[in-house]
Image (tube, rainbow, N blue to C red):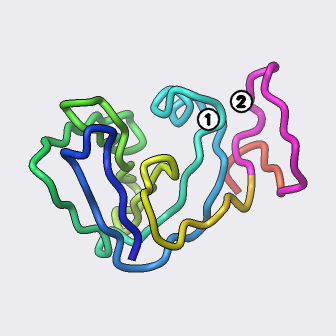
């Protein structure tokens, strides 16, 4: 099990399964949502996500999916893809404990800001692999 929460802890969740395809993403949608470049994500099956807490979740349709965040503290908590409803993308920064995988790749590097440097040997993809 993997546990996560927003900054104010009013939204808490558990992932009953493994995270996979962990990555750094440089696309405009992800970096704006995360407020940083790169954004770091991992994928989970939607059916494994259990939400707890008393907080309200706001969903913003970015055109590619629903970007979900806490209405109290504004923290992004996950992304629901329109094309792949069976998958949710979880920002690594909201995960509190459990088996959190290190990113395995860089995606959308063609959108990487000029000031951002990649300092590892992970695979780099200009778009989505």
Residue at point 58%, 28% (across, down): 36
Q: Residue 58: x, y in percent?
A: 20, 37
What residue is shown at x 31% (from left), y 44% (from top)?
Answer: 6
Identify residue for label 1.
27
Numbered tag placed on residue 71 in the rendering: none
Q: Nearer the viewer, residue 12 or 117?
A: 12
Per the image, is 60 magenta? Answer: no
Q: Quadrant of residue 123?
A: bottom right
Q: Quick one: SS at disc 1? A: loop
Label 2: few (<14), some (14–19) or many (≥20) C-alpha neighbours in 10 Å: some
Task: Say which quadrant the C terminus sits in.
Answer: bottom right
Asked if residue 50 is positioned above or below residue 128 in the image, the reply reads below
Residue underneath mark 2: 111
- Badge 1: how crowded within 10 Å, few (<14), some, or many (20+)? many
Q: What residue range appears in magenta?
A: 106-122
Query: Magenta-highlighted stretch: main secondary structure?
Result: loop
Q: The N terminus is located in which quarter?
A: bottom left
Q: Is residue 39 left or right of residue 43?
A: right
Per the model, the C-alpha gap separating discs 2 and 1 is 6 Å
Q: Which residue is painted at 49% across and 33% down in the image?
A: 34
């Amino acid at each position: 099990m993997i546990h996560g929460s927003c900054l104010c802890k009013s939204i808490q969740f558990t992932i009953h399964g493994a995270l996979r395809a962990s990555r750094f993403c440089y696309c405009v949608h992800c970096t704006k949502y995360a407020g940083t470049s790169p954004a770091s994500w991992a994928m989970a099956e939607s059916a494994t996500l259990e939400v707890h807490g008393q907080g309200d979740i706001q969903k913003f349709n970015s055109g590619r999916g629903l970007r979900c965040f806490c209405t109290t503290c504004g923290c992004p908590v996950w992304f629901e893809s329109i094309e792949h409803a069976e998958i949710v993308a979880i920002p690594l920064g909201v995960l509190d404990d459990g088996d959190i995988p290190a990113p395995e790749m860089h995606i959308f590097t063609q959108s990487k800001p000029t000031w951002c440097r990649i300092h590892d040997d992970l695979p780099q993809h200009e778009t989505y692999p």
